[in-house]
Image (tube, coloured by chain):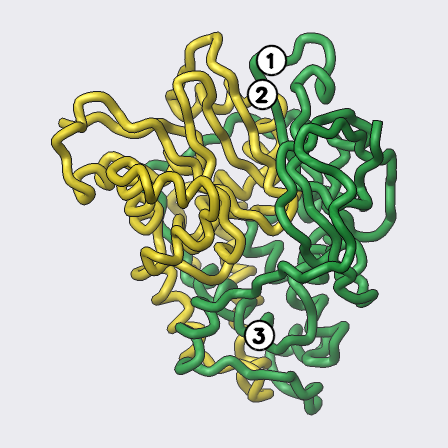
Chain colours: A yellow, B green
Amino acid sequence: MSEDHHDHDHHHDNRYSAMQARVKALETVLTEKGLIDPAAIDAIVETYETKIGPRNGAHVVARAWSDPDFAEWLDRDATAAIASLGYTGRQGEHMRAVFNTPDTHNLVVCTLCSCYPWSVLGLPPIWYKAPAYRSRAVIDPRGVLAEFGLTLPENKKIRVWDSTAELRYLVIPERPDGTEGLGEEELAGLVSRDAMIGTAVAGVPA
Amino acid sequence: MNGPHDLGGQMGFGPVAPEKDEPWFHTDWERRALGITLSCGAFGAWSIDESRHARENIPPAEYLAASYYEIWTRALEMLLERHGFATRSEIDAGHKQLAPSTPKRILTADMVTGVLARGGPCDRPVETQPLFQPGDRVRTKNVNPVTHTRLPRYARAKSGTVEAVQGSYVFPDDNAHGRGENPQWVYTVVFDGHEIWGEGSDPTLTVSIDAWESYLERV
């Protein structure tokens, strides 16, 4: 970050510029030692910027909404059902799908670090990794949901899943009304990343 | 350990503040930090459990002030030093001074797709039968280890119900410290909100954790 970058928060800028130097130094040392391949870093970044993201998870949800056999498989063996659509790998090795119902809303958190189903949602957003969400999701989920603009009926049960082991959770939102005629691709368009974490519900057709 | 990472139920961090249309990365060094961390993980010199424990060992004031990729980077530096891949002096200088330890594997660009698609499964067979079954009432132990654990503080000494036997997995409390994988059965245990948070808690709330068998005792 350049010296003349004066627009808002200097503390933030200084911290970022110190980290830029620190990470650059680390990459240089490790490259000089032959321990890392900068082209591998480029490939990792490209994978997570272009190939692995919440469209994967939305595809899973749309298939579950469209195909009761797939939904049953997803409930019984989410890892295999999701792998059948081509989504496998790092931070998705052991998947569980949890289904919202008229009675119960599911919300996923990792209070201890930032465990998140990368293979179906991509890299986690900053708020998911930050103390405000990790601290409050388990004690005040309705307060947290309100900050996402989601107010649930008072009698709806809230089930919070703290990802303390290596199971990674994907929330399957309820299928919205009025979507009977839609195909998988249109259905997937109604499923946001947040709906698959549980901080939102599925969208409604325009 | 009762470290800064164990955040469940803490207060005072303010609103969640989700960012609209958040980019994958906010600055270029975050891209490099992700790629370097994953590349060094491929050395095979430490487990995900050891790296989580390294992050937990960042002093609380620093941990809570750091962004997540900063936490990752600080922990990675600790691991590189501990395992002989780089010294503090080299990292500070930004140049090689000594020959490093030899890793089991160096991740090259052509390996990335395969490595990410395989991931690192950590289910392992065990010879015992599960001690608990769905529906069993259990209590989490009251423990405060100075070492790594995945039993959060808010869920210690609490009574709940086993909902599912999830399989057997590497035991992080041992594996983080090089004591072997020592797999155990893992259970999803559900607690009423009131059991955890007491008076005034949300009556519609239940919280579950995934607990290794040795975290639990029968009630």
- Residue drawn where x is 87% and y is 34% of the image: B142
In the structure shown, which secondary structural element does the residue marked by tag 2 occupy? loop
Decide if residue B86 is in sight here. yes
- Residue drawn where x is 79% and y is 66% of the image: B180
Q: Where does label 1 land, which residue?
A: B202
Circle 3: is it few (<14), some (14-19), or many (20+) Cα within 10 Å? Answer: many
Q: Where does label 3 land, which residue?
A: B42
Seen in the picture, residue A103 relative to A189 is either above or below; the reply is above
Residue B49 at x, y = what percent?
Answer: 69, 59
Circle 2: is it few (<14), some (14-19), or many (20+) Cα within 10 Å? Answer: some
How many labels, in total? 3
Name the side, left or right, on which B132 lies relative to B11: right
Seen in the picture, residue B87 relative to B164 is either above or below; the reply is below
The Cα atoms of the two marked residues, 1 and 3, are separated by 43 Å
Q: Amino acid at mark 2?
A: Asp
In depth, the one of A102 and B28 nearer the eye is A102
Q: Where does label 2 land, which residue?
A: A140
Q: Amino acid at mark 3?
A: Ala
Residue at mark 2 shares a chain with residue at mark 1: no
